[in-house]
């Protein structure tokens, strides 16, 4: 007999935030759940990180809309929920949970909340290094802690992020779990099996141009290869995406042969990203060092592995609970020389590239696919 799972709150949506929509779809299609959606998907172009760039009056208006929308969802949940009901609160769950936290414990439904991106961590630790000590930082941290403590279970994407949530917000470790993110894997699973063909390798970077991804490290490695006469003609580098380091990449591209360094600045639809990955010989992951970059397994690595392509990424990473290390070419964090050496080694060894590509798709099927997400949900206390 299927169980009812009620979806609550205003949730991020679109191809940049696939986890909520794909989790709901997977649980409805593959899990034994009857989904009742009493929440609402936010517009795909509404990204919370953009709120900090708005004028103060527009920030207040956006936050008021988030608050009102979550309040309406909470009222609907309280009318519909029974003591046996289980509520899924997708990211950004903090708004809904903060409202929920003001109810007595006896009135709170059993909520399972996504918290894989901490609002406080993104706004303050990323900028101040240690989280800062401003009044705003302290207030946001207390607010998020109160919100997350109102959930019966909190979900993170990796074990390192789970540990950080517990430490930062004083959460009960028994109530925090890490499990794989959910993506729409279909466009990536149709990629043909990798077969080395051309002498010049296509090296692909997909993602937001931010320090976490190690964009400066990547550009330094690319520069080293383009400066070496023996390596210059062995690679073609493609960048897909934009972000705060976009101007640095723009300057880099302008200094180099457009046949060797190509930048597709506009974000591409999912099927186009899948085509770019399918055409790549090597895909570049994360190289941002031992900070936040070492606590994540970003969506793009899910995409690369699902497509069955060789991946180079830093060795410092974290994974969902009980998930083995992926079959990738690992390099030292934030080390341009190590990245350049790894690319040369893979260029010299087509058999190694083929082995990594084949192992990648099998790994995705076993540990990160939709079936893995559903299995992880089945272990939750619901």
Image: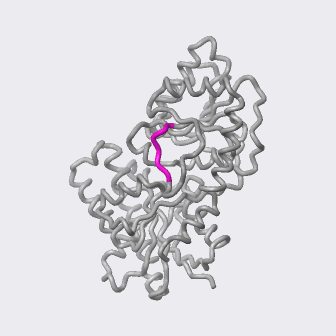
In the image shown, does 150 or 41 lie closer to the viewer? Answer: 150
Q: Give the magenta part as a residue range.
A: 314-319
Which quarter of the figure has residue 278?
A: top right
Q: Residue furthest top?
A: 229
**Residue 277 visible, this angle:** no
The picture places residue 195, in percent across and down from the top left corner, at 77, 35
Q: Residue at x 64, y 34 (%)?
A: 282
Question: Taken as a whole, is the magenta stretch helix, strand or loop?
Answer: loop
In the image shown, does 148 or 175 lie closer to the viewer? Answer: 175
Query: As drawn, is 115 to the left or to the right of 233?
Result: left
In the image shown, does 50 or 86 lie closer to the viewer? Answer: 86
The quarter in which the N terminus is drawn is: bottom right
* 317 inside magenta stretch: yes
In the image shown, does 98 or 83 lie closer to the viewer? Answer: 83
The picture places residue 306, in percent across and down from the top left corner, at 66, 49
* 329 inside magenta stretch: no
**Residue 105 visible, this angle:** yes
The picture places residue 70, in percent across and down from the top left corner, at 43, 72
32 lies above or below 130:
below
Q: Residue at x 28, y 48 (%)?
A: 131
Query: As drawn, is 109 to the left or to the right of 267?
Result: left
71 lies above or below 115:
below
The picture places residue 148, in percent across and down from the top left corner, at 36, 67
């Amino acid at each position: 007999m299927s169980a009812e799972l009620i979806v609550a709150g205003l949730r991020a949506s679109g191809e940049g935030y696939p986890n909520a929509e794909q989790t709901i779809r997977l649980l409805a299609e593959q899990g034994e759940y009857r989904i009742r959606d009493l929440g609402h998907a936010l517009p795909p172009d509404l990204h919370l990180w953009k709120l900090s760039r708005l004028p103060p009056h527009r920030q207040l208006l956006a936050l008021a809309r988030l608050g009102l929308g979550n309040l309406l969802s909470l009222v609907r949940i309280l009318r519909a929920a029974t003591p046996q009901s289980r509520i899924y609160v997708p990211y950004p769950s903090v708004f809904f949970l903060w409202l929920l936290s003001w109810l007595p414990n006896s009135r709170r439904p059993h909520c399972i909340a996504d918290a894989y991106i901490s609002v406080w961590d993104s706004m303050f630790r990323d900028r101040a290094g240690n989280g800062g000590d401003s009044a705003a930082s302290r207030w946001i941290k207390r607010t998020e802690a109160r919100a997350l403590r109102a959930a019966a279970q909190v979900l993170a994407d990796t074990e390192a992020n789970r540990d950080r949530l517990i430490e930062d917000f004083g959460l009960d470790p028994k109530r925090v779990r890490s499990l794989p993110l959910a993506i729409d894997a279909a466009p990536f699973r149709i990629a043909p099996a990798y077969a080395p063909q051309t002498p010049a390798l296509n090296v692909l970077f997909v993602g937001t141009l931010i320090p976490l991804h190690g964009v400066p490290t990547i550009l330094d490695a690319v520069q080293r290869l383009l400066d070496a006469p023996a390596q210059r003609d062995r690679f073609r580098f493609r960048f897909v995406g934009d972000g705060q380091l976009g101007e640095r990449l723009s300057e880099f591209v302008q200094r180099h042969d457009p046949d060797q360094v190509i930048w597709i600045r506009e974000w591409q639809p999912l099927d186009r990203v899948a085509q770019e990955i399918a055409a790549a010989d090597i895909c570049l992951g994360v190289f941002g060092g031992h900070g936040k970059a070492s606590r994540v397994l970003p969506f793009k690595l899910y995409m690369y592995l699902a497509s069955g392509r060789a991946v180079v990424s830093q060795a410092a990473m974290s994974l969902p609970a009980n998930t083995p290390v992926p079959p990738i070419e690992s390099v030292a964090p934030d080390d341009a020389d190590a990245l350049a050496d790894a690319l040369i080694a893979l260029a010299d060894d087509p058999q190694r590239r083929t082995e990594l590509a084949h192992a990648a798709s099998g790994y995705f099927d076993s540990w990160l696919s939709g079936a893995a997400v559903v299995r992880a949900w089945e272990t939750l206390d619901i």
